[in-house]
Amino acid sequence: MALLMSAAGYAKECTPTSTMLEGTHLEPVTREQVDIGKGLVVQGRVLAAPDCRPVPGARIVHWQAGETGKYVDHLRAWLTSGADGSYRFETEWPALPTPHIHFMVTAEGFRPLTTQWVGDTPVDQVKFDIILSPE
């Protein structure tokens, strides 16, 4: 995704994040909590297509398998994007053959999005911007 800054401070072009399957482990997530583990910081911004304006107040539900390779309740939570669309949480590395974290993002005036961040080599920081499509 190319992010070319305009005079207004937003990118000129923002392509919506691809939809990906929610998987078979989606369960109701009722817990609002920022940090759910240790060792991996996930951060980014929720932005609006097509011009990359920040989306404040987006609800970001996330769930994943943990170090044991199993989906567990303590690795399911949600948080809200800040005034500048930013979000940040700490978790543990998802120990699966294809490491990934599921996201379901909703915000007023935008289509709901279910997607995944997919990694490969263990790292301690991930930047994952989420681009929503207007309704």
Image (cartoon, rainbow, N blue to C red):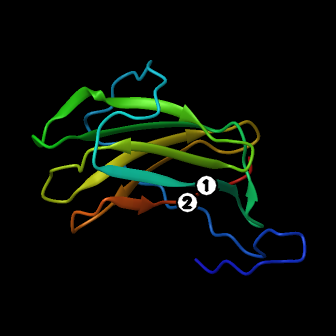
Q: Taking 74 as reference, is 110 left or right? A: right
Tell me, for residue 45, which label it has, or none: 1
**Residue at figure coordinates x 68%, y 38% from the top left:** 107
**Which residue shows up at 57% across the image and 46% down it?**
87
Tell whether 108 sits left or right of 43: right
Which secondary structure lies at badge 2? loop
Q: Which of the 4 quarters of the picture holds residue 66?
A: top left
Q: Is residue 129 left or right of residue 39?
A: right
Disc marking residue 97: none
The percent coordinates of residue 77 (x first, y second) are 41, 29
In the picture as drawn, the residue positioned furthest to the left comes out as 68
Q: Relative to the observer, which residue lies in front, 107 or 23?
A: 107
**Callout 2, which amino acid?**
Asp
Residue at mark 2 to residue at mark 1: CA–CA distance: 5 Å
Compared to residue 50, the image places residue 39 above or below, namely: above
Provide residue 111's location: percent of width, then percent of height. Answer: 65, 45
What residue is pinned by disc 2? 129
Query: Residue 97: x, y in percent?
Result: 12, 58
The residue depicted at 38 percent of the width and 60 percent of the height is 125
Q: Is there CB contact under 8 Å for labels 2 and 1? A: yes
Write the residue at 21% across / 68% down.
121
Which quadrant: the N terminus?
Answer: bottom right
- x then y, percent, for residue 105: 55, 41
